[in-house]
Image (cartoon, helix red, strand yellow):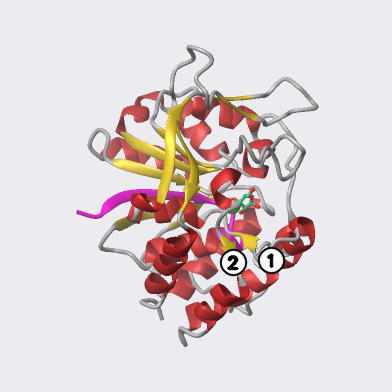
């Protein structure tokens, strides 16, 4: 039986690839809906990007909602310097014909979970955790409906990418991340520690281009754009591919390795705001709230992506 999921996202080239992987895999994943959140760029632009990605995949049956326009307590920090002015620079995608659904994205999450059986829906978080925190605050009873929250965010051994100590998604809304990590819902965390192993080398980007479909060409253009910033920053032979680790985990968890430990979010310090403090060595008795993924097989990851994206138009 395919796993029921809701994708919460701020697309983002890497978010787009994560969404395309899910939409290409109906035998494994049933996408109940996509909810945009403010993050890489504004909420409005992120929602529009989500529509473009859905249209690219040909799966226009998937509803797209708009959620929160800013973090719980902080002004929004964006990342045009990484993703471009549109947030999805690179491919030349048409203006979407599909429309954002009526109703607020947080209400979509709450109403959907209320309808579904206990422990049956996985939430996939690819951006700041504002919408998911809001849903848990608005309707705490939905926590028991969530099977797991699989999220891209945080870091421990790799520490930070937007500040020396924080990863972007957690940094943008640390209070929301704190709500999520304190919720008691099982969390699978894809931190920089694993995403920094998933490098989109030229050979891997060429393999997307060589698929010969419009999705492969668009993905190659997305990754070609977003790697510019990262290649200069890190000096590696490819840029990290973050968010697709989330949807790849749902399809092929054997690609990844990690351990159960406590993760607590720093919200008070200005210096280390949004740090995901991970008790990897079990030196406290804090509850083990998170499956922290530390490594993954990058060849298997890219093989899965290429094989699945070949199935799309
Ligand atoms: C995360 O930040 C965003 O810019 C990416 O889409 C990813 O979700 C990586 O730190
Ligand atoms: Ca993202």
Residues shaded magenta: 1-14
Q: Which residue is mark 1?
A: 227
Question: Percent x, y for residue 41?
Answer: 69, 54
Q: Mark on residue 159?
A: none
Name the side, left or right, on which 53 lies relative to 142. Answer: right
Q: Is residue 36 magenta?
A: no
Pick the residue in front: 140 or 29: 29
Q: What residue is at 57 percent from the left and 31 percent from the top? A: 177
Q: Mark on residue 200?
A: 2
Q: First in sequence, mark 1 or 2: give its number.
A: 2
**How many other residues sit within 10 Å of disc 1, few (<14), some (14-19) or many (≥20)?**
many
Residue 173: quarter of image: top right
Judged by depth in the image, the label closer to the viewer, 1 or 2, is 2
Pick the residue in front: 139 or 196: 196
List the single residue furthest toward the left.
Answer: 1
Image quarter hosting the C terminus: bottom left
Mark 1 in CB contact with mark 2 (< 8 angstroms): yes
Q: Secondary structure at mark 2?
A: strand
Name the side, left or right, on which 72 lies relative to 141. Answer: right
Q: What residue is at 49 percent from the left and 22 percent from the top? A: 182
Q: Is residue 290 visible?
A: no
Pick the residue in front: 191 or 45: 191
């Amino acid at each position: 039986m395919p796993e029921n999921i809701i994708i919460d996202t701020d697309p983002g080239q890497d978010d787009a690839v994560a969404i395309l992987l899910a939409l290409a895999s109906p035998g494994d994943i049933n996408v109940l809906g996509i909810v945009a959140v403010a993050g890489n760029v504004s909420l409005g632009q992120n929602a529009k990007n989500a529509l473009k990605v859905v249209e690219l995949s040909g799966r226009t049956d998937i509803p797209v909602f708009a959620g929160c326009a800013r973090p719980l307590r902080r002004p929004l920090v964006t990342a045009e310097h990484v993703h471009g002015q549109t947030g999805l620079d690179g491919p030349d995608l048409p203006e979407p014909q599909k429309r954002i659904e009526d109703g607020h994205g947080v209400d979509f999450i709450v109403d959907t979970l209320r309808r579904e059986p206990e422990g049956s829906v996985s939430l996939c978080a690819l951006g700041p955790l504002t919408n998911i925190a809001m849903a848990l605050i608005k309707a705490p009873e939905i926590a028991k409906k969530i099977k797991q929250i699989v999220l891209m965010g945080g870091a421990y051994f790799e520490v930070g990418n937007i500040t020396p100590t924080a990863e972007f998604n957690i940094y943008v809304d640390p209070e929301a991340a704190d709500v999520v990590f304190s919720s008691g819902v099982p969390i699978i965390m894809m931190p920089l520690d694993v995403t920094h192993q998933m490098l989109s080398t030229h050979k891997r980007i060429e393999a997307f281009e060589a698929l010969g479909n419009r999705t492969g060409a668009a993905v190659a253009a997305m990754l070609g754009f977003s790697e510019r910033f990262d290649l200069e920053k890190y000096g590696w032979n490819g840029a990290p591919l973050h968010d697709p680790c989330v949807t790849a985990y749902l399809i092929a968890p054997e690609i990844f390795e990690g351990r159960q430990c406590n993760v607590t979010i720093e919200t008070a310090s200005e210096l280390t705001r949004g740090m995901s403090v991970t008790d990897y060595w079990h030196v406290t008795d804090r509850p083990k709230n998170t499956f922290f993924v530390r490594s993954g097989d990058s060849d298997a990851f890219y093989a899965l992506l290429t094989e699945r994206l070949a199935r799309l138009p």
